[in-house]
Amino acid sequence: MLRWLRGFVLPTAACQEAEPPTRYETLFQALDRNGDGVVDIGELQEGLRNLGIPLGQDAEEKIFTTGDVNKDGKLDFEEFMKYLKDHEKKMKLAFKSLDKNNDGKIEASEIVQSLQTLGLTISEQQAELILQSIDADGTMTVDWNEWRDYFLFNPVTDIEEIIRFWKHSTGIDIGDSLTIPDEFTEDEKKSGQWWRQLLAGGIAGAVSRTSTAPLDRLKIMMQVHGSKSDKMNIFGGFRQMVKEGGIRSLWRGNGTNVIKIAPETAVKFWAYEQYKKLLTEEGQKIGTFERFISGSMAGATAQTFIYPMEVMKTRLAVGKTGQYSGIYDCAKKILKHEGLGAFYKGYIPNLLGIIPYAGIDLAVYELLKSYWLDNFAKDSVNPGVMVLLGCGALSSTCGQLASYPLALVRTRMQAQAMLEGSPQLNMVGLFRRIISKEGIPGLYRGITPNFMKVLPAVGISYVVYENMKQTLGVTQK
């Protein structure tokens, strides 16, 4: 990507101080498209695209804002040169922190060692793929000139941001699965990027859940009523729901499912930050294990907070036409006839299901991605969107397989009061009853529609998320 930039605009030099004075001038002229002696944001973006190094709107705006000292909306040559010199100083410090043996070159083993100190474990083969993306002369080491040219226009400022850049842009992951909340840099928190990302994710989740709501309701119906009739299958279940309440009934309970996204995301994000602080000493980098524990505990905290909405979602989904006029009516009737405790029926199996789901989802995702990197990656460590989405869908499916019996028991406990003549059993009692009457397969009733919604849910969520990030002006990761 930077071959032309390295070979023409940025001639090789022994060190920064010995570079010819025309170096910055040549590059500035390449960006100054109309030759008026200043570069505006449009010229910067177009120029970087022509050089083959588009960074994304937010990164380019960050460069422009930092360099535009007099805030006149344009970069003159002095401002441009000062920005590059200041940025190179920061990149020099980052280079030296990676160059452990001070030989002026970064090797694969040094990348592995440096990432380990920051809580990120990769193989030496994966580190070599990182080197290949920066290495211009094929030596499998990176010297200062190669490092400087590669990060010249990337607005990262220190080694932590560089690691974050590698993590997001090359597919290296430290366990950010569906149960681990997003992490944000201090700069993203100050600039407001964090809430835009959360909003984009929330909207994507709402669209995804709404799109797959009929399958979700079918799953709940099969979980609750499947034991009554072994004849309930996917087509029969859809036909029964449409016959009872019409096409609109396929989305019954979806409103609650969408409404709970915002409070669940907010509590999970807040709790995750608090648990990370509790599990690490001040200044210490959080490792993969601590991140997993923090994410699982944050998920449990968020579930505790929004669990009454989970109960209402199940009641609405299982309820007959006219039984509840809406969320408020459902809550009022549950409180009146069953008391406050009814809002936490099935809470224990729900809580117990978080750890196996999160652990297996995380482990399988890492295993699949590492397998791809070790066996199929050639000149890049970026698996690409489709590979990552595939890994995510498969790992989520494996996590669901492990936790599904607990999810089924939770749903039955939530809906028990609605089933006439059904005994009010606890978690252990329900497990015994299901196994004795339906066998082990009874613990997996409704899992087929659950699996059917994984791929469309992941795909729809991704497409909407990416579009919402562009709409909201979120940095492309």
Image (tube, rainbow, N blue to C red):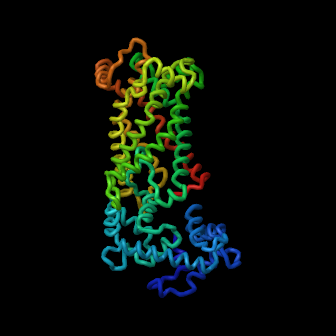
Q: Where does residue 167 sit, x and y in percent of width and height?
A: 43, 59
**Residue at 33% across, 40% down:** 355
**Residue at 45% across, 30% down:** 308
- Report which quarter residue 436 is drawn in: top left
**Residue at 28% across, 22% down:** 432
- Report which quarter residue 123 is drawn in: bottom left
List the single residue furthest toward the top.
Answer: 421
Q: Where does residue 451 sit, x and y in percent of width and height?
A: 44, 35
- Would residue 216 be found to the left or right of residue 228 on screen? right
State whether residue 164 appears in this view: yes
Q: Where does residue 92 sit, x and y in percent of width and height?
A: 43, 76
* Picture layout, residue 408 above or below residue 127: above
State whether residue 371 appears in this view: no
> In the rendered picture of this protein, how many numbered marks are placed on residues?
0
* Picture layout, residue 312 above or below residue 99: above
* Picture layout, residue 343 above or below residue 197: above
Q: Where does residue 223 sit, x and y in percent of width and height?
A: 41, 24
- Report which quarter residue 356 is drawn in: top left
**Residue at 55% across, 47% down:** 199
Identify which residue, 293 or 406, lies in the foreground: 293
